[in-house]
Image (cartoon, rainbow, N blue to C red):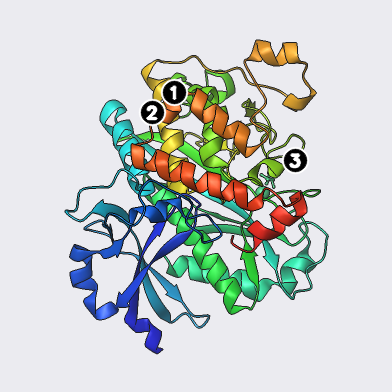
Amino acid sequence: MSQSSDLAIFLTNDLAGISRGRAFPAADLKDRMRAGVGWVPANLALTPFGVIGANPFGPLGDLRLQPDADATGFEMTGLNGAPDLKAFMCDIVETDGVPWGGCPRNFAKKALGDLMNEFGLHLKGSFEHEFFLLGDNDIGDAAFTLQDFRSQQDFLGSVIAALTRAGVDPEMILREYGPKQFEVTMKPSRGLAVADRAVILREVTRDIARQFKQRACFAPIIDPTSVGSGVHVHFSLEATDGKPVTHDAGQPGGISVQVASFIAGILKHMPALCALTAPSVISYLRLTPHRWSAGYNSYGYRNREAGVRICPVDDTPGHDISRQVHLEFRASDATASPYMVLGALVRAGLEGLRTKMKAPPLVEGDPADLSAEQLGKLNVRRLPDSLPAALAELDADKVVSSWLPAPLQQGYRALKTAEMERVAKLDPLGQCALYAGYY
Ligand code: GLU
Ligand code: MG
């Protein structure tokens, strides 16, 4: 076993979707589970580029990164499978252990708690990831090819093995459509684990790529003229006893009245949600029509231009589809914190559930092909086309902005202001190159 196997690390995944933390001797783990490691409020204003934006916290205040009492963590491993770092996704708490209002993980935890307490529902789901494999490699331009897959099979197989060891149930790995683009998916889990696993999947994939002397780049887009990399959030709802409540064959799209209300809440607030789910400057180079990302807050049956898509199932006669039917939110990418994405989707869904919103109309075809009048009738609109536009939507949507505790609002604003300033003078290609170095 290498010497580094004697280390453990406590991590937070911040508002820029970047994992940061502090390591310590693994022998101290038992004590550290109680005591945590130190952290500071100003870190919430860290830009992806590693600089802290001007913020109201300044040098003051102390916090701790602390795992849940029953957390088991995940192993990071060498290519030979030997564990060499035990990692834990933590909450950010005050020094007395009270959850801090600026903790993204706690934001998701509380939203999931409300979903359970108010409606007796769990969220089941998984984040689907696309990424670019950068570095000295001979991946061609041809999508989905066996030859490109074969050229990287050692790496791809190692990713699947490492994800399995890290406790993430991998599902599939493939050569995606874009140049040097791949996709990795995992099987669904429940509640907060859905976001924890999204972080783990990214970090483990990056870690394996690093060991292959490559970079697994999860930036939303690396070439403004080509396709982007999405993080598609697959979800369904279940009762406490595990009974699925998403499917109802008698309803439009096969989605139950209750889950349709949940979706209606998401679609209603989607322009403002983008500020949290697609939160970087280059997110908006990806989030444009005709890219199979999401240009509109539309609802579609098996439609990849939809903001929320009803996904396909194996409906061979005789197969039970009630546990398969689920939705996919497509307007998110890896510059977002998975915790903020999960929390915001659940909060928006809760708005729909509480007011029993009506099922949204299903839009056929590409919403970009519809006239303004047709879109108006369907209650569908174009999503913001830039980060400033998304931030303006967030300001204007008092419901969405009210979900964010003061420290989250302050940290988020500080970070976004500094991030926008940093990239302002770069052209789109330069912006892509900059972000690619950090994601
Ligand atoms: N690459 C597309 C995106 O940016 C998604 C393509 C797909 O449907 O898998 O979201
Ligand atoms: Mg894909």
Secondary structure under tag 3 reads loop
Q: What is the CA distance from the residue labelled 3 to the residue labelled 1?
A: 30 Å
| x and y percentages locating residue 107 in the rendered image | 35, 41
Residue 26 in view, yes or no: yes
Identity of the amino acid at label 3?
A: Arg
Query: Mark 3: is the Cβ under 8 angstroms from ligand 1?
Result: yes
In the displayed structure, 318 sits above or below 125; it is above
Q: Are dots 1 and 2 in contact, CB under 8 Å?
A: yes
Identity of the amino acid at label 2?
A: Ser
Instruction: Specify the label residue 291 is tagged with.
Output: 3
| x and y percentages locating residue 263 in the rendered image | 50, 26
Q: What is the CA distance from the residue labelled 3 to the residue labelled 2?
A: 32 Å
For mark 2, what is the residue?
Answer: 402
The image quadrant in which ligand 1 is located: top right
Dot 3 or dot 2: first in sequence order is: 3
* Disc 3 crowd, CA 10 A, few/some/many (<14, 14-19, 20+): some
| x and y percentages locating residue 53 in the rendered image | 49, 52
For mark 1, what is the residue?
Answer: 398
Instruction: Specify the label residue 416 is tagged with.
Output: none
Horizontal relation, residue 98 to residue 126: left or right: left
Q: Nearer the viewer, mark 3 or mark 1?
A: 1
Report the front residue among 157 and 68.
68
Which residue does the image show at 40% across and 31% down from the upper left? 347
Which residue does the image show at 31% across and 27% down from the upper left? 119
Query: Mark 2: is the Cβ under 8 angstroms from ligand 1?
Result: no
* Disc 2 crowd, CA 10 A, few/some/many (<14, 14-19, 20+): few
Dot 3 or dot 1: first in sequence order is: 3
| x and y percentages locating residue 271 in the rendered image | 57, 28
Identity of the amino acid at label 1?
A: Lys
